[in-house]
Image: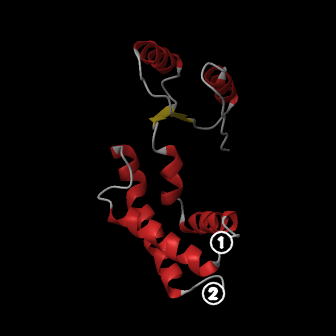
Amino acid sequence: MITLILGGARSGKSTYVEQLAAQHEGSVLYVATAQAWDEDMANRIATHRAQRPAHWRTLEAPVEVGKAILGAPPARFQEYEAQVRSEYAWVPDTTFRSGRANILKELLARPHLFCTMQFREQYEALARRNLRDSLAAIEGGVGESS
């Protein structure tokens, strides 16, 4: 089961998530996205770290979560690509393909797709494969008719 909890700062997300996860019988991966921009936030993060049970896996990834889809299993990544296309359904196909190809090329040209070593180790290789496959499909005209 994957549960995503969203909310503003000091909205009770952490307390709610910790209560929910404590009831879960399986393994827990706690994804923490807060950044310590000041001393108060650093203290809040430290408090939250101390409150989490030791057997929970914690991933502190303030800037990586949105990019994790790049390293999803290929079928899920293809579904994501189809969702991106449907979001831009109003854009003519040739224009979309050209723009999307440029984005994919720019991503592939980066030395690293992810900022943290944890995400690089876990997602980088598959993300690059997904991006290359998507680019090949776009440039080869696979998918929608032009």
Give the quadrant of the C terminus. bottom right
Q: Earlier in the sequence, mark 1 or mark 2?
A: 1
Q: Secondary structure at mark 2?
A: loop
Would you name the residue on which mark 2 appears? 146
Which mark is in front, 1 or 2? 1
- Residue at 67 percent across and 40 percent down: it is 3
Would you name the residue on which mark 1 appears? 91
Which quadrant of the view contains residue 78? bottom right
- Residue at 50 percent across and 51 percent down: it is 68
Label count reads: 2
For this rendering, which residue is in front, 124 or 136?
136
Q: Is residue 88 left or right of residue 58?
A: right
Give the amino acid type for the residue marked by disc 1 in the picture. Val
For this rendering, which residue is in front, 108 or 100?
100
Q: Is residue 138 left or right of residue 129?
A: right
Q: Say above or below: 32 vs 110.
A: above
Residue 86 x, y percent position in the rendering: 69, 67
Q: Secondary structure at mark 1?
A: loop
Between the C-alphas of marks 1 and 2, the distance is 12 Å
- Residue at 51 percent across and 76 percent down: it is 98
Give the amino acid type for the residue marked by disc 2 in the picture. Ser
- Residue at 43 percent across and 55 percent down: it is 123
